[in-house]
Amino acid sequence: MARNMQPVLKRCRTLGISPTVLGVDKSSNKNPKQSRKKQSEYGLQMNEKQKVKFIYGVLEKQFRKYYVMATKRNGITGEMLLQILESRLDNVVFRLGLANTRREARQIVNHGHITVNGKKVDIPSYLVKPGDVISVREKSRSSVRIKEIVEENAKRVVPKWLDMDRNTLTGKVVTLADRDDIDYEVEETLIVELYSK
């Protein structure tokens, strides 16, 4: 499995995003780089694509696959792309507060701690559908680390497209994410323009 091992804070600074989007509380003591020259249109498009890929921890091949999938759905391609990325199992686990970061959520899913509709799923890129019930496996609920994570994220606001029961560590996908549910700045039209060249 290929992984992005770049330093999170350095990459956030380069892409101009806040580390809190990734679930990281640390702040860097260096100032963000001030661009000396005006970025080209292609540079802006590429930067936007790299930003979204980095936030969700997706590499190029898989991202392109999601873009093709988004073009085949009814609706605005850019919004459909973000909807697909939001419906990844690792992202849903992060949004439910069962992990501090998307990287941690990916690891929790990989290690088999999560079930979807009662069946163990260990594929982070699994796409959830409305009505799916995501929960922590019975064996994993007594894990010290899972308990710590749930306590740390007790006050985290769960998006309106998800429903979470913290007592049973069970969440439900009410509907798929809308464009309004995206909590970071992104211009998805630039990504569509880049791929449609």
Image: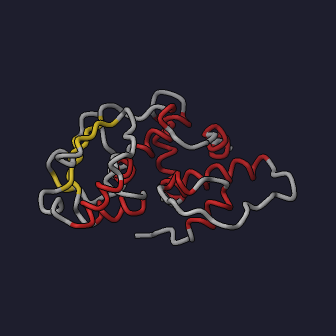
Question: Nearest the camera: 137 or 100?
Answer: 100
Which residue is farthest top? 75
Residue 194, placed above or below residue 143: above
Q: Residue at x 15, y 52 (%)?
A: 119
Disc tally is 0
- Residue 125 position within the rendered picture, expressed as x and y whole percent measured from the top left: 36, 54
The quadrant of the picture occupied by the N terminus is bottom left
Q: In the shown orientation, is residue 2 left or right of residue 105?
A: right
Q: Residue at x 17, y 62 (%)?
A: 140
- Residue 151 position within the rendered picture, expressed as x and y whole percent measured from the top left: 30, 55
The image quarter containing residue 144 is bottom left
- Residue 37 position within the rendered picture, expressed as x and y whole percent measured from the top left: 87, 56
Q: Residue at x 39, y 46 (%)?
A: 156
The quadrant of the picture occupied by the C terminus is top right
Q: Residue at x 30, y 38 (%)?
A: 129
Residue 116, placed above or below residue 7: above
The image quarter containing residue 174 is top left
Q: In the shown orientation, is residue 191 left or right of residue 128?
A: right
Give the colour scheme shown. secondary structure
